[in-house]
Image (cartoon, grey):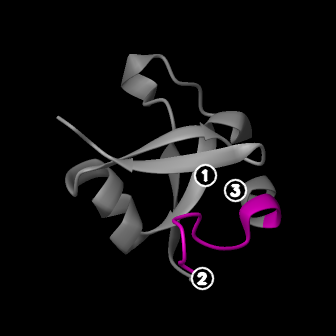
Amino acid sequence: WRALMRRDRTCQFPGCTRTQHLQAHHIEHWAKGGETNPDNLLLLCKTHHCAVHEGGFRVEGRVPQGLIFRESQE
């Protein structure tokens, strides 16, 4: 958690600057083999975490190399 906070500092959703009540999100879902380590995690506020899981967005890439948020076509 501390490593994620030190690296990300804010919600990683584009344009969001929230710094409190952040949640760790697996880029590659753990149920699909994604590991629980900083390379596969990013911090999102609750609103944007819900947007990724239930609101039609997906995350591609890695932190800090670069993340892309796309609207899901599913």
- Residue identified by numbered label 1: 42
Label 1 sits on what residue type?
Leu
Label 2 sits on what residue type?
Thr
Q: Nearer the viewer, mark 3 or mark 2?
A: 2
Label 3 sits on what residue type?
Trp
- The quadrant in which residue 24 appears is bottom right
- Residue identified by numbered label 2: 17
* Image position, residue 6 (x, y; %): 82, 64
Helix, strand or loop for disc 2 = loop
* Image position, residue 4 (x, y; %): 73, 56
* Image position, residue 71 (x, y; %): 31, 49
Relative horizontal placement of residue 7, taking residue 31 as reference (left or right): right
Residue under the point 60% across and 52% down: 42
Mark 2 neighbour density, 10 Å: few (under 14) some (14–19) many (20 or more) = few
Relative horizontal placement of residue 9, taking residue 19 as reference (left or right): right
Give the Cα separation between the discs numbered 1 and 3.
10 Å
Residue under the point 53% across and 78% down: 16
Q: Which residues are magenta?
A: 6-17
Give the camera-side residue of 26 and 64.
Answer: 64
- Residue identified by numbered label 3: 1
* Image position, residue 73 (x, y; %): 21, 38
Give the Cα separation between the discs numbered 2 and 1.
14 Å
- Dominant SS of magenta comes to loop
Say if mark 1 contacts mark 3, CB within 8 Å.
Answer: no
Mark 1 neighbour density, 10 Å: few (under 14) some (14–19) many (20 or more) = many
Residue under the point 39% across and 48% down: 70
Say if mark 3 contacts mark 2, CB within 8 Å.
Answer: no
Q: Nearer the viewer, mark 2 or mark 1?
A: 2
Residue under the point 39% across and 66% down: 48
Relative horizontal placement of residue 52, taking residue 38 as reference (left or right): left
